[in-house]
Amino acid sequence: MKLPMKFFDTKLMGDLLQRIEDHRRVEQFLTSSSLSLLFSFFTFLVFGIVLAVYNLPIFAVFLIGTALYAGWIILFLKKRRQLDYKYFEQAGRNRNVTYQLIGGMQEIKLQGCEQRKRWEWEDVQADLFKVNLQSLNLQQVQQAGSITINEVKNILI
């Protein structure tokens, strides 16, 4: 509400609603993901100290494996960010087209442009599907690599 009127004039309704939905993602990150990260760091620290006291070469393997794991995750952050921006844009377009369809159904029927509007909606759905598919592919590659690194580390330890 505190934003200038120009902000609301230049944004589509779907884009604004997508921004509101993204606040939920930020809230989820700040509550669950950051807590999980804190516990992981604490576990890493305790396990690292125990390994360092027990056997220094095993600690070195653990440290190198963990560094490789972290590097592998960091390697995909830029691409993940790009896909998140694409998803945000496509989801906003999807919401906007859906609201136009629902809100203007009477006008669409009167004008006889059901097919054209359906094709427009299908194009947006296809674009959203492509972004989701790219995101899933990236997630699978990232997960496969991280599991492999972790399992090799565990085998060596």
Image: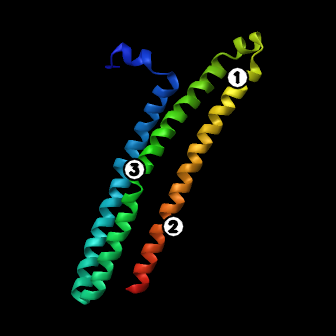
Q: Is residue 131 above or below residue 56?
A: above
Specify the amino acid type for callout 2: Ala
Q: Residues within 10 Å of mark 2 (few under 14, many from 20)?
A: few
Residue bearing mark 3: 78
Who's the residue at 36% across and 58% down the image? 74
Q: Position of residue 21 (x, y in %)?
A: 46, 35
Q: Left or right of 4: which side holds 133? A: right
Looking at the rendered structure, the kind of residue marked 3 is Lys
Image height check: is 133 above or below 2? below
Q: Residue at x 33, y 20 (%)?
A: 3
Check contact, mark 3 vs mark 2: CB within 8 A.
no
Front one among 134 and 41: 134
Question: Pointer 2: what residue?
Answer: 144
Asked which quadrant contains residue 22, the reply is top left
Of pointers 3 and 2, the one earlier in the residue sequence: 3
**156 or 39, which lies in front?**
156
- What is the CA distance from the residue labelled 1 to the residue labelled 2? 40 Å
Mark nearest the camera among 3 and 2 is: 3
Mark 2 element type = helix
Judged left or right of residue 79, residue 95 is right
Q: Circle 1 sits on which residue? A: 117
Label 1 neighbourhood size at 10 Å, few (<14), some (14-19), many (20+)? some
Q: How is the image coloured?
A: rainbow
In the rendered image, residue 56, in percent from the top left (x then y), is placed at 24, 87
Look at the picture and state if 79 lies above or below 98. below
Estimate the spatial distance between the alpha carbons at disc 3 and disc 1, rounded to whole Å.
35 Å
Which comes sooner in the sequence, label 1 or label 2? 1
Choose between 78 and 51: the one closer to the eye. Answer: 78
